[in-house]
Amino acid sequence: MLRGILIGVLALGVAGTAFWGYQEHREKNAILINAENNYQRAFHDLTYQIDLLHDKIGTTLAMNSRASLSPELADVWRLTSEAHSDVGQLPLSLLPFNKTEEFLSNIGDFSYRTAVRDLEKEPLSEEEYQTLKQLYKQSADVQQDLRKVQHIALEKNLRWMDVEMALASNKEAADNTIIDGFKTVEKTVEGYDETNFGPAFVNMQKKDENYKYLEGKEITEEQAAQIGKKYARLGNNVNIRVTENGKGSDYGFFSVSIQNKKTNEEANMDITKKGGYPIWFILDRKFSKQKVSLNEASNNAVKFLKENGFKDLDLFESAQYDNLGVFTFVSNQEGVRIYPDAIRVKVALDNGKMAAFSAEDYLKSHHQREIPEPAISAEEARGKINPQLKVMEDRRAVIMNDLNQEVSCYEFLGTLGEDTYRIYINAETGQEEKVEKLKNAEPVFEDVV
Amino acid sequence: MKKNFLAGKVLLIISLCILGIPLSGNMDKVNAFSNQVIQHGAVGDDVIELQSRLQYLGFYNGKIDGVFGWGTYWALRNFQYEFGLPIDGLAGQATKNKLLKASKYNEQYVKEQINKGNKFKHYGGRDLEKQTKPQQGGAAGGNNQQQQTPKQPTATNVPNGFSENDIQLMANAVYGESRGEPYTGQVAVAAVILNRVNSASFPNTVSGVIFEPRAFTAVADGQIWLTPNETAKKAVLDAINGWDPTGEALYYFNPDTATSGWIWTRPQIKRIGKHIFCK
């Protein structure tokens, strides 16, 4: 009797466990498949976009009428951005796959640049036409390679989850076709020299000008330590550590770390080797309650910049974050604001002293510029603005436009309803270069942090 | 037991007294700004008073949230224009004196409304009772004088181009990736995320970069969903505001735990804490 019950209970237990195990297994599979599906979608999307991209570039080449070119180029631009986002979703970031992404982004840049231009007035130049042709050929190769991978993947029923596993375990199985396939794609693209794109084609990474405007002699490690000490103002009882930049850096710099032996307050900064200019500085300490007003802090920031030889600056923005004030300054050349030359200073509001600053943008771009006399008057420029907007302030400015070029503009600050806008009108052509809606304070949602 | 009760009573009375003093003080004294010059970007009680007074005179129609934003700025400039003051957008002593003379400020009312999270306005010459509406009331009635004001602190400055949620997401990633690192190291991780957003070789959004599969270990193993601390958030704000301690790095790795051989082939820029940053 007892044995019968026992057997019954055990049997139930075994059946229950089996059922539970089966459930778990199914759930796991469901999730796996879900993830797999996501990857599959991204991958097939990508090949599809590249297909389309290739066709589109082909049609633009065949087109005769300039007027229809613009929308077509805009479409190319849209496709590259979609393909780009698809690449981002694939588990490939450990593979050196960035050449392909760069290739996509180059097509994107080119098509955007030409699409937004008025092609009636300024048609494609011969050089640009050649570039387009080249892009067409290259996209064909990429398309071919990707299609090959796609074909094998479909035929052999390859799973992205397996790629994931292979990458995770770091044993690259000999016949991991997807990985190998993508490596081939990458190699093909790598073969395309960047000079193919012509001199007017700035790659994002190439635009970095590596502090070419800086003057002065190379400093020594010893001098760097002295400069660091001066900025940190942590007294004389400090440990100073100076390290040189790694080999991979485009420019020479010293990293200086200063620690007060008593309080353990630590300051870190980078200093350019050439001339010993401070690139950035961060003081790490506990900040206590606010005692100094934002206005006083901004005056201190101005004083600090003056003391350290940064001249002709306008305070452009100020904002308080808890007990810290952050100020952005831009340089001012004969009444024209130069926005690319920006310096940011952070002042602690407990003692009103500088807590951090960053002069990277300023050091990279500041130089005496030739600012051309505007071709249109401020009144004419104002006429180009949406008449709904109530203009409150105007001035002249130099900004970086969407194409990463410096342009001389009229800047207008105006309001529309409750919002404030900043609008830049090109002082040469009257083109609307940029419209920015300025941020309002954001309401705090509770329990966010 | 009884002693405890007595002690509690005494404590209660004392605390009531302490509470009572500032309350009664508020009612009697003429409210005035502290002596700081208030400028664009400031936050705090002085800004609340400034906004309330400007609203009392009808210059400011936005919500009284204690953040000196663009709306407050134009209101102040219009006030300075109308009252013949130099138009600088700064609330200095002369401006504040004029404001004090021209307007009234019912601090108790305003603070109470903010604390309760009510929608309210502070226009002069109207019954205050009619300018407030409890939160539950909703936006019904179509009265354009009612605006929403969340609980205190009611608003915060956010850098252009980013929302509080972007910052939060980044803080999560930074905390998950580098919570044991020095402060500069945390700013550096945040800067790498932003450098990737700006780079041609990576997705163009913060979320795209963070959730790019296998890009960050913290995302892969779920550590991104730990609750970040204030330091991580400060580090993110610094990075967004323009600090990049990495020298424009796009990758970083911990040399002790890195499993990928490929990462060692990247040109290295520098080391911060446990991480090596590279191109």
Image (cartoon, grey):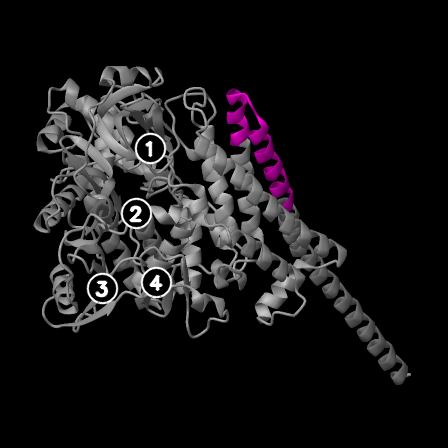
Is residue A397 shown left or right of residue A434? left
**Chain of the residue that carries numbered disc 4 in the rendered image:** A
Is residue B61 shown left or right of residue A189? left
Q: Amino acid at mark 4?
A: Gly
Between the residue at mark 2 and the residue at mark 4, the CA separation in whole angstroms equals 25 Å
Between the residue at mark 3 and the residue at mark 1, the CA separation in whole angstroms equals 37 Å
Q: Of label 4 and label 3, which has the lower sequence position?
A: 4
Please rate how many residues cluster around mark 3, counting C-alpha atoms within 10 Å: few if below 14, some from 14 to 19, many from 20: many
Between the residue at mark 4 and the residue at mark 1, the CA separation in whole angstroms equals 38 Å
Q: Of label 4 and label 1, which has the lower sequence position?
A: 4
Is A301 placed above or below A423 here?
Answer: below
Is residue B195 shown left or right of residue A89? left
Whether the magenta-drawn stretch holds residue A64 is answered as yes
Q: Position of residue B102 (x, y in %)?
A: 15, 23
Q: Position of residue B54 (x, y in %)?
A: 22, 26
**Chain of the residue that carries numbered disc 3 in the rendered image:** A
Label for residue B241? Answer: 2
Please rate how many residues cluster around mark 2, counting C-alpha atoms within 10 Å: few if below 14, some from 14 to 19, many from 20: many
Q: Amino acid at mark 3?
A: Phe
Where, by quadrant of the figure, is residue A441 drawn?
top left
Mark 3 = which residue? A254
Q: Amino acid at mark 2?
A: Asn
Residue at image coords 62%, 48%: A42
Q: Are marks 4 and 3 in contact (CB under 8 Å)?
A: no
Q: Are marks 1 and 2 in contact (CB under 8 Å)?
A: no
Same subunit, labels 2 and 3: the answer reads no
Mark 1 = which residue? A438
Front: mark 4 or 3: 4
Residues in magenta?
A: A47-74
Mark 4 = which residue? A248
